[in-house]
Amino acid sequence: MIEDKYLNWLYAKVFNARSVPSYRQLFEFLFKIEFIPMDNVPLDQNRFSDVERLRSTFGYETGADVTYLNGHVYSLLEVMIYLCMTIDHDILPDIEEYDGAGHWFRAMLASSGLNTQYDGAFSPQGAGMICDRIMFRRYNFDGRGGLFTVQNPQFDMTLADLYRQMMWYLSEVYPFD
């Protein structure tokens, strides 16, 4: 089935088969969570085109027909993976101290609290509560509880689009010259 192939492809973008702990259950769960931009954060509408690019990349790399995926909701998982791949491929491509997109994905899991939802400890109810907090911007001013936490926020992270949050986070973690 195309969804299984796609989920395996997404998983391989941020984890390898031997990654411990495993987050397969969380991946399947996040793939079902629809990404819904908040009305007061209009730039998050851009994440829809990011997901379309991600799906196209999957089709290109695997030869799979992505037509079926185009009927699927734009998922929180896809948004997260796309942002991680953007950091790894476009923003910090030559930084060897980080282990690629997986590093950034694990950072998102830690910031949001989803890192507690590994296989064997996964709770749909617990993961759902965290996803609601992320999607409806019920996290802290500094982003803690969301996908990106910054130490010295200059702006309320709950009001900024995810791309801008990502850039603020990266400028603290890896100051740009």
Image: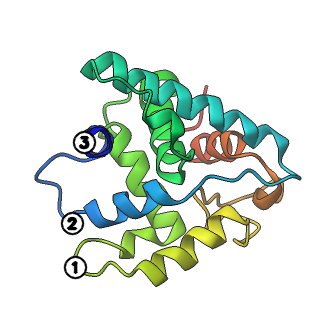
In the displayed structure, 95 sits above or below 151; it is above
* Residue depth check, mark 1 versus mark 3: number of the one nearer the observer: 3
SS for callout 2: loop
Q: Which quadrant is home to the N terminus?
A: top left
Q: CA distance from mark 1 to mark 3?
A: 25 Å
In the rendered image, residue 108, in percent from the top left (x then y), is placed at 48, 56
Foreground mark, 3 or 2, reads 3
Packing grade of label 3 (10 A; few <14, some 14-19, many >=20) is few
Q: Residue at x 40, y 27 (%)?
A: 66
The amino acid type found where label 2 is placed reads: Pro
Label 2 – label 1 distance at C-alpha = 9 Å
In terms of sequence position, does the residue under pointer 2 or pointer 1 come before the other?
A: 2
Task: Give the residue at the far left of this rendering.
Answer: 18
Q: Residue 120 has which mark?
A: 1
Mark 2 lies on residue = 21
- Compare residues 98 and 129 and report the one nearer the observer: 129
Q: What's the residue at 84%, 42% (across, down)?
A: 42
**Residue 151 place in picture, x, y as percent:** 65, 61
